[in-house]
Amino acid sequence: MQITVVNGLSGAGRSVAAGALEDHGWFVIDNLPASLVPKVAELATSATGGFERVALVMAGYDTEMANQIEALREQLSNVTVVFLEASDEVLIRRYESTKRRHPLDDGHGVPAAIVQERERLMEARGAADLIIDTSDLNPHRLRERLIEHFGNTEDVGAMRITVSSFGFKHGIPLDVDMVMDCRFLPNPHWDPELRPYSGLDPQIQEYVLERPDTETFLDHLDALLEGLLPAYAEEGKSYLGIAFGCTGGHHRSVAVAEEIARRLKDKGWKPRVSHRDIDR
């Protein structure tokens, strides 16, 4: 049985997450008080309940909620806590567009309420297995991101790995565990014949991957991951995000991410691959 606890900042997408999970077969309970977590877990795991995947969407965070989630982890082996966040600027813009009141707005305005909520949820963020920054995600893209992680039951309990690429000029992704800088590699952008292609094309992959510096980098990283991944899995880590960045996220980082994903697949892992900025 899988239980996913969804928490996060107001306006960061909890309602979208609840809808996405429900649409893909999860039994979703929204705005669940912490005091009812044990009862829900008992019902969900009982013979009469029979639910295989349950999502608990919760707002706020306090000592009682922390204790209940920890007790849930001790009772069940497959519990994942997801935390949704976004930048202050994006959250303010979302509240302005929807004309909704922030739940912590006591008359001092939305920016002050966001700062207050962010401080309250620092511990919740630190306890999460998966952090998703929704600043650059519209509801459709957030749904896609969630379904990448929770859309099927294949390999339930196994550590899920995401290998991604990005462009530093568009910002470093905040929801990954490891960031690798590929800007030391020669840039195909400066070759007019190669510029139109991406790191998914064989012309770019040959240009980037067959250089001695790239081969050395990949071999060292390959050896590092060979030791780290089993250790992470042994410690019970549910998700691992590895991101490769170059200037624009179009050539070098894409080619390297694809190669690392290929090597991981050869070792029996099943990484998901995404390229955030390839079409920018």
Image (tube, rainbow, N blue to C red):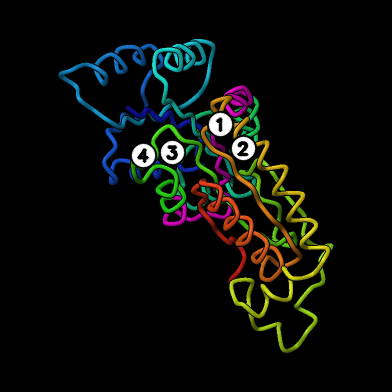
Residue type at mark 2? Leu
Place residue 195 in its image quadrant. bottom right
Per the rendering, the mark at residue 18 is: 4
Crowding around mark 1 (Cα neighbors within 10 Å: few <14, some 14 to 19, many 20+) is some
* Disc 1 to disc 4: CB gap under 8 Å: no
Per the rendering, the mark at residue 14 is: 3
Give, as a single range, the part of the protein colored magenta: 120-142
Report x, y in % for residue 69: 46, 17
Q: Marks 2 and 1, how far apart in space? A: 6 Å
* Disc 2 to disc 1: CB gap under 8 Å: yes
* Disc 4 to disc 3: CB gap under 8 Å: yes
Crowding around mark 4 (Cα neighbors within 10 Å: few <14, some 14 to 19, many 20+) is many
Crowding around mark 3 (Cα neighbors within 10 Å: few <14, some 14 to 19, many 20+) is many
Residue type at mark 1? Ala
Report x, y in % for residue 17: 40, 42
Name the side, left or right, on which 17 lies relative to 136: left
Q: Residue furthest bottom?
A: 193
Report x, y in % for residue 133: 58, 45
Residue 12 visible to the viewer? yes
Q: Earlier in the sequence, mark 1 or mark 4?
A: 4
Q: Which residue is mark 1?
A: 233
User: In percent of the image, x 42 and y 56: which residue is there?
Assistant: 140
Residue type at mark 3? Arg
Q: Which residue is more in the foreground, 126 or 3?
A: 3
